[in-house]
Amino acid sequence: MNKLKVGIIGTGSISESHIAAYLKNDKVELYAFCDLDEERLNYMAEKYNIRRTFTDMNEMLLLKELDAVSVCTWNSAHAACTIAALNAGKHVLCEKPMSISEEDAKTMKEAAERNNKLLMIGFVRRYGNDCKILKEFIDTDYLGEIYYAKATYLRR
């Protein structure tokens, strides 16, 4: 069975989590990296022994053998990168947030449907214990009627 060839769009700090997960999966081959910051791109390519590097996302998306991409860019670029990848026939795992507007999110969804490709948003905390406990509080009416909520998430 052929390995799934994955490209990374945006090699900033969050990409390290994606890369680590891909490296643990023997069905995946890290295939190409893309970043506007050529110094960072070269550092990451050397660190992970990636030979195919691009500063232009559209050039990377021309690789016919590339199956999927992780979009790990700044938030305001998520929609444009995701839509371009879907339109190029690639499956996409996009970092959170999906986009910075509802309109962009709908366009991303439509691009996935139109191209018959998978689009997944990296909302990795939704099944964490903290979320389960809060959901249980809400479902059992432990908190009463909720009319306002604000949450903050801190991590090391």
Image (cartoon, grey):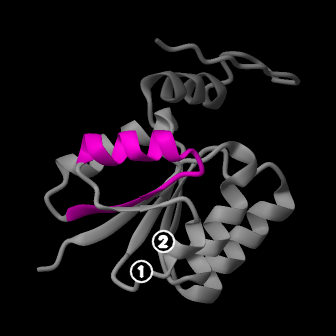
Q: Tell me: residue 45, above or below residue 68.
A: above
* Residue type pointed to by label 2: Met
Disc ID at residue 60: 2
Q: Tell me: residue 52, above or below residue 75.
A: below
* Residue type pointed to by label 1: Leu
Residue 155 image offset from top left, x and y in percent:
50, 14
**Element type where label 1 sits in the image:** loop
Q: Nearer the viewer, residue 101 or 17?
A: 17
The residue located at (61%, 26%) in the rendering is 140
* Horizontal side of residue 56 vs 64, given as left or right: right
* Horizontal side of residue 101 vs 77, given as left or right: right
Magenta region includes residue 46: yes
Which of the image's four quarters has the N terminus? bottom left
Question: What is the span of residues highlighted in magenta in the rendered image?
Answer: 28-48
Q: Residues within 10 Å of mark 1 (few under 14, many from 20)?
A: some
Q: Tell me: residue 139, above or below residue 115.
A: above
Q: Residues within 10 Å of mark 2 (few under 14, many from 20)?
A: many
The residue located at (53%, 52%) in the rendering is 35
Residue 48 image offset from top left, x and y in percent:
25, 46
Q: Nearer the viewer, residue 154 or 61?
A: 61
Q: Nearer the viewer, residue 117 or 135?
A: 117
The residue to which callout 1 is attached is: 63
Q: Is residue 124 visible?
A: no
Q: Is residue 63 visible?
A: yes
The residue located at (30%, 70%) in the rendering is 5
Magenta region includes residue 141: no
Residue 127 image offset from top left, x and y in percent:
45, 37
